[in-house]
Image: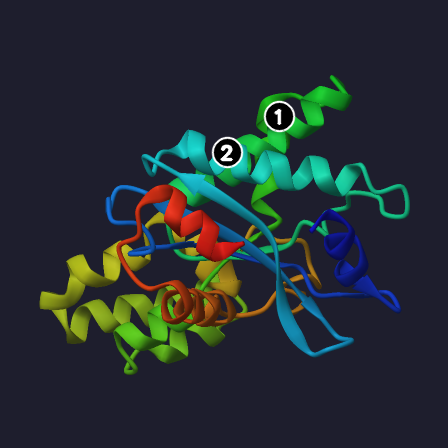
Amino acid sequence: MRERLSEVLRVEEQVHGLVSDAAHKIFKDRSKLLITTSSYSPIIKRWLPVLYSFNNGGTIEHFRHHFLTLFRSLVRQPSHACTTHILLNRSLILLLLREGFILAYIDLHLESSHEKRSRQLRDAAKQCLKGCQEHLRAAVSQIIALLAFDRFDELQAAVAEFYKAFPSCSKWLGWWLNDARAHMLFKAVTDMLPGTWNLAPHTTNAQESQHSMMRCSIGYDNEVFAGWRGLC
């Protein structure tokens, strides 16, 4: 998968980024997840898996090790520098996954250089993360316009108007506007570098489609080793 990762990440200088998600119900023990990351191949016009990780606890550390393995595979490829554009990652709106990504990014750079402090690296990692807007669209169609604002003041005004019109929805919308989630979902407050927002895909549906095909192929509620044999 490492060679495939290197081949599909960049074709004719077009960057497609990565899509990550956690698959549920693959294993019988529901606390055990399958973390997956894919990259788009413009050659066959399909998203291809580049890394699977077994997650037996759903903690930040599990996601941290998944992404650190992914990043190390990238930097071992002599033909590609591990740039912010290559690390652009679309992920499910899962704060554990987000924090694991950030910690792995810091680990990777501290392994090779001590020039940046952890705070600087954390800020740099956030520039690579984008949440799944499709989950927000599916949650409610009436506030889909919030995704389109480019400026913070416009988003802020729209949110204030929404709160005024629908005060009973304040807690629900507040969940989506949580600082960490908002910075992954809304262009107006993103931490991503200028010009990179549209480089990353807007949804993790490609990953979820793969997860659905996995379940159709190997079934639900597998024992650990039976599940892995099915994936192979």
Image label count:
2
Instruction: Indicate the secondary structure of the residue bearing disc 1.
Output: helix
Is residue 106 found left or right of 8 in the rendered image?
left
Contact (Cβ within 8 Å) of mark 1 with mark 2? yes
Classify 53 as above or below 185: above
Residue 20 image position (x, y, % from top left): 51, 55
* Quarter where residue 121 is shown: top right
Amino acid found under the numbered disc labelled 1: Asp
Element type at mark 2: helix
Q: Residue at x 85, y 47 (%)?
A: 80
Relative horizontal placement of residue 130, taking residue 139 as reference (left or right) = right
Residue 44: name its quadrant: bottom right
| Nearer to the camera, 186 or 161 | 186
Q: Taking 165 as reference, is 26 above or below it?
A: above
Residue 58: tell me if it is visible.
Answer: yes
Residue 120: tell me if it is visible.
no
Question: What's the residue type where badge 2 is placed?
Answer: Arg
Residue at screen point 45% across, 61% down? 185
The residue that mark 2 highlights is 64
Say which quadrant the C terminus sits in. bottom right
Residue named by callout 1: 107
Q: Relative to the observer, which residue lies in front, 222 or 121?
A: 222
> In front here: 207 or 228?
228
For the point 51% across and 63% down, the residue is: 188
Name the residue: 62% across, 36% down: 69
- Percent x, y of residue 122: 57, 33
